Amino acid sequence: MTDVPVTTRKDWTTDQEVRWCPGCGDYSILTAVQLLMPELGVRREDTVFVSGIGCAARFPYYMNTYGLHAIHGRSPAVATGLAMARGDLHVWVVGGDGDMMSIGGNHLIHALRRNVNLNILLFNNQIYGLTKGQYSPTSERGKVTKSTPHGSVEQPFNAISLALGAEASFVARTHDMDRGHMQEMFRRAHSHPGAAFVEVFQNCNVFNDGAFAAITKRDARDSMLIDLRHGEPVRFGADGEFGVVMDGGRARVAKVAEVGVDALVVHDEADPDPSMAFALSRLANTNDVPTPIGVFRAVERSEYGSAVTSQIAASQSKAGPGDLRKLLHSRPTWQVA
Amino acid sequence: MTETSARTQEVRTTDGIVLRFAGDSGDGMQLTGDRFTSASALFGNDLATLPEFPAEIRAPAGTLAGVSSFQVHISDHDITTPGDAPTVLVAMNPAALQSDLHLLKPGGTVIVNADAFNERNLAKAGYESNPLEDGSLDGYTVVTAPMTDLTKRACQDLGVKPRDAERSKNFFALGLVSWLYSRPVKPTVDWIDGKFAGRDTVIAANKAAFAAGHAFGETAELGASRLMVNPAELEPGTYTNINGNTALSWGLIAASQQAGIPLFLGSYPITPASDVLHELARHKNFGVRTLQAEDEIGAVGAALGAAYGGHIGVTTTSGPGMALKAETVGLAVSLEVPLVVIDIQRGGPSTGLPTKTEAADLLMAMYGRHGEAPLPIVAAQSPSDCFFTAIEAVRLAVEHRTPVILLSDGYLANSSEPWRIPDVEQLDSIAVNFASKPNHVNDEGESVFWPFRRDERLVRPWAIPGTPGLMHRIGGIEKEDGSGNISYEPDNHQAMVRLRAERIALIAHHIPPAEIVGDPDASVAVVSWGSTWGAITSARRRIESAGRRLAHIHLRHLNPLPANLGDLLRSFERVVVPEMNTGQLCRMLRAEYLVDARSVTKVSGQPFTAAELVEAIGEAIGATGEQR
């Protein structure tokens, strides 16, 4: 990290015209990232943004780094190859809920399971934007869209639960109305060795406006967002009057006055067992109840690319560096004179 | 093996034998055939093999569905096929005899495990009477041996359980044929020691069975003549016996060494391609990274990501996987990044015939992507040629910044042949030139990097992440030529479609011209690609020795085709194109050159035999009126 030149947001910004709809939540996420990058102490040329298809997937064009805009759903796979090949890079993956949880669901869960060194940002707006308004795998049951005129009959994914189920070593949630919180989560993701998954509640003001308003608008946050803090009791409300307790194996919101402070769950993001994190993720499956944000889970686990690199190093120290001539003669041979 | 009871029997010399081992999937026929092959290779014969096994791991024992076979052709001269018809059939049970007897040459030798010919097994194989007793084998020389019983007896004092001892009966069969066909004993004994090291009773049982089979040959009145196939006169050098998938894997490693950048394989298990993943996974000391991906799409996606990062990105698969990878290959066409996509073809469509060969993916390789998405295609012609074809695929991909499809097939993948090991100093080099500085001055007079600024071959720079000052964004959306910025301009798209086609077409100037083997003045030319090379070469030699003339043009490069091919083809009265599909190359040649090429096809899951081709080509020669 020595000699990394001092940069400003301008250095991380391209000359490309940003083509999201005016008012899109993606703008605030882009701003948060561009402002954060100079603080991370990394070089632009060592940073790569990889994306799939969708509104969010245009993100790399606006970052003055290396950028690869791939195809629908495949960004975690493409990024896996890149990160395995190039452990020296900082690889970010950006995509929406359709891209990463529907068509690319398989690649996402396996990138998380393998713990590839990627920072995966899921812009969850619970709708398909680029194709103009179909329901997504995170849309709520009953959602009326062009492709569900009578309402969706599908159970949505809870992205945090899914990531935890996929053995992710770092799982966090933030939202597009709070730059400071976003930057804190992105910074944590960046410093986490292995796959870091950050769900960003993102407003699509054209096709799903206000989807998260009940929990993210300024005057609702105190009572509707449960800010998870490592080592502290899980507590929220303007005066901390609410908290989370475990009740019959489930997490539940309670009034602190009724249960007492000692009954509150103390958040442990480093718990090797993801059960408590999963229970917290189940507190909210709709956007009209108190919803946890912050780091659900951050555990240390062998990072995939470095594990592969160590095997290569071990193999080279044992067998010596590859010798092609030796390889070609490694099976029984005979001479013809 | 033992001196004590050896009868002296005359050994007759022959120029070649085609031996077919057939038995139940659990009988170890692939291993037996492989050992016979290795001993013959070390002895110095030329050889070619054809393993055939069911797609099921263990079909019900004793049934026709469970028959697994291994054919090997050993010869005292240069050969190119595993033989049209076996001269010897080793049948370990009635099902094997029922399934494979029709392949045997009239008058050939049948060697059977008599113990397996009981009522139950006969019924399972659909025999109403015992063929060993009812005279139905009268036209053949029959050698019967109670292999199961003699194997058990040989093992009885070794502390091996009778059930385990029975499993060594394939070594009894191997011992017997090793005696009958005068194979050296030592390579097999050494191999048993190495393979089963640490499992002393298994070593003892296999050696005892092998010795018992050998002794049985020496002592029993077999009624079959003992044959010897002398070493072949091959080009001087050091040889090893190699199959197509191993040669392919080694070729990829060699290419990585020649290019000086690491190899990355993204793959998903699929028959008959998995062995390339297995082989490459073993060679981490060459810096090889292998990823067994979550699916075929993940595999090619990761390979593309690694290629973007400056590695040699490779993905291996077979037909069904090719279908799944198509969109990502199209992305590589659009991005103009090096990517090697290897298709070990098998019978299709859909799951088709996973363990049988076919070469019906050529048009998919040509056209199986949406939009205009041309890319180079190369095909291997023999097991050992997979080595050189892999290097060529990497060379084209890296030097021309394009995805390349390499076509092999199930037959090449599993067949083996002696290979004169090349001098690694003589291998082609592969030029990797990563971009390191800006390549354009913009309107403001600043030096900038344009990712799609092309050289004289229309090749764009390969600027890998980590290179200061060359940060750029590229994707699958149409790009403005030069700057690489997103462009939806009609004229730009038209220009880019043409540029992508032209740059692939230009590769014709960077590959060798097509060459004629045989008589350039013949009236008939055979044009071929892929594994048909062996059978066609064998057929050409037979046609020539019958005093007729034939030209053979074999294509390694299928897109672009060699620049001289059209002129060559037009110089023949008739062009015949044998293919293991329904006429795909033939269609391409007719479309490209307006020549009246005629198709000869076979899609039975089996390679062509030379005899089939001699007949088909003979008809074509006859039709031209050329005299014998």
Image: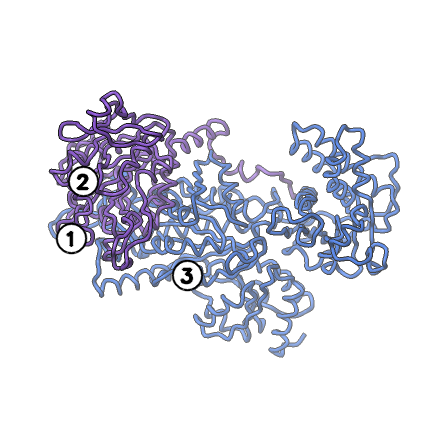
> Mark 2 or mark 1, which is nearer the start of the sequence?
1
Q: Quadrant of residue B267?
A: top left
Distance from the alpha carbon under mark 1 to that under mark 2: 23 Å
What's the amino acid at mark 2?
Ile
Kindly indicate which chain is depicted in blue in the rendered structure.
Answer: B
Distance from the alpha carbon under mark 2 to that under mark 3: 48 Å
Q: Residue furthest top?
A: A262
Residue at 55 percent of width and 40 percent of height = A328
Quick check: A249 left or right of A181? right
The foreground one among B262 and B521 is B262
**Which residue in the protein does label 1 denote?**
A21
Chain A, colour shown = purple
> Can you see residue A322?
yes
Query: Are the residues flagged by discs 1 and 3 from a single subunit?
Result: no
**Which residue in the protein does label 2 denote?**
A215
Disc 1 packing (10 Å; few <14; some 14–19; many ≥20): few
Quarter of the picture holding the N terminus of chain A = top left
